[in-house]
Amino acid sequence: MPSSSPQNSDEPSGLLKTLGAVFSLVLFGSFLSKLKTPPQQSMNSISPNTEASDENDSGRDLQPLSAQLPPSAPAKDNSYRCCHHKTPLLKIVLDVGTFLMAVGAVIAASIYAGISYKMWGEMQQQTCIQKDAAMNAERAWVGLVGNPQVEVSSLKEKRFTAQITFALKNFGKGPAFNVSSLSNFATHGHVSDIIATTCNFIFPGVGLKPTRPVYPSGEIYKLQRGQILYPDQPPFAFGTDTSGESSTVLGQEVFVVGCIAYKDQFSNPHWAKFSFSTGPLTTDVVRDPSSFKHLYISSANNYTDDAEKKPSCPVTASPE
């Protein structure tokens, strides 16, 4: 069994630290902007001593001096000097500097976040690839052992019967479950269709959806649940009985095709297709039952589900 893959990490924690630094800079700038120069106390705000003694040392009344003082300046002059002061240059410089620092920090954080996200995606892809590679190295791999064996009745009759037998072996490291297989005859122009139909009969046994319906409406899957093949187990023999019109195989290059379906120990369904022929149409055709004694592997229609498997790992955009 493959070792458990590392858990997918969330967004890098460094991004959170960077955003926290930006927030601190903004708060610091806001604090500096609220600093004000100490208010200048107007000299006129100091109230004169109105409690001066009205008597001198001799006890005689004196005239109040307030009558001899000139009138004070209008109140509007004091309010102008108090409330309409200019903003200190230092405060302006601090505000502009704080704003520029905040903008620069936001830009830097955005760039860092983009780079971190790209690195995170590449790490996720590498983790997925390693996981798939580990599973493929440990899972079950079922395939044929040798060529199929065919026993055919006399082709002089209108119809013939045949029995196709073949051996399957688990070449992987894990057990294979629900192993099923079927085979049949096919001729030129119909090989792909016959293989597809054969696979569709056994696909439901491993949870695969047929490419097209092959059972009557409402009829359940009647084939057995299949066999269990272990890696160290000897080859297991499977057989299929078939029949047909003798005229369809005489003088033809006949193909012995089949399909294998199974599940690995990770409950993932798999299939394999195979195809053999009695010989090229131009040199060796079926003339009697002995033509099926020597079968040749076909150059096509021998492949597994890995050939059509879509990438399961996320694909990151390559740098331009």
Image (cartoon, rainbow, N blue to C red):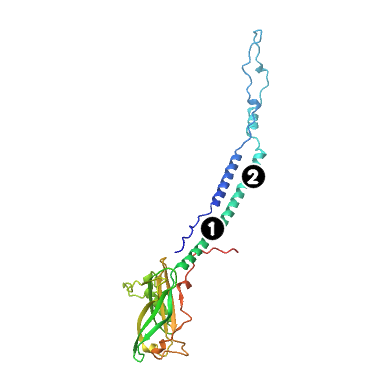
**x%, y% of residue 50?**
62, 18
In the picture, residue 237 is in which quadrant?
bottom left
> What is the secondary structure assignment of the residue under circle 2?
helix
- Indicate the quadrant containing the C terminus: top left, top right, bottom left or bottom right: bottom right
Lower sequence index among marks 2 and 1: 2
Q: List the residue tagged with mark 2.
A: 97
> What is the secondary structure assignment of the residue under circle 1?
helix
In the picture, residue 151 is in which quadrant?
bottom left
**x%, y% of residue 67?**
66, 17
**x%, y% of residue 271?**
42, 73
Q: Is residue 159 left or right of residue 305?
A: left
Q: Nearer the viewer, mark 2 or mark 1?
A: 1
Disc 2 to disc 1, C-alpha distance: 34 Å
Give the residue type that dot 2 points to.
Answer: Gly
Q: Callout 1 environment at 10 Å: few (<14), some (14 to 19), or many (20+)?
A: some
Q: Is residue 74 left or right of residue 259?
A: right
Which label was assigned to residue 154?
A: none
Q: List the residue tagged with mark 1.
A: 120
Q: Callout 2 environment at 10 Å: few (<14), some (14 to 19), or many (20+)?
A: few
- The residue depicted at 43 percent of the width and 78 percent of the height is 145
Look at the picture and state if 245 lies above or below 80: below
Give the residue type that dot 1 points to.
Answer: Trp
143 or 283, which is in the foreground?
A: 143
In the picture, residue 318 is in which quadrant?
bottom right
**x%, y% of residue 107?**
60, 52
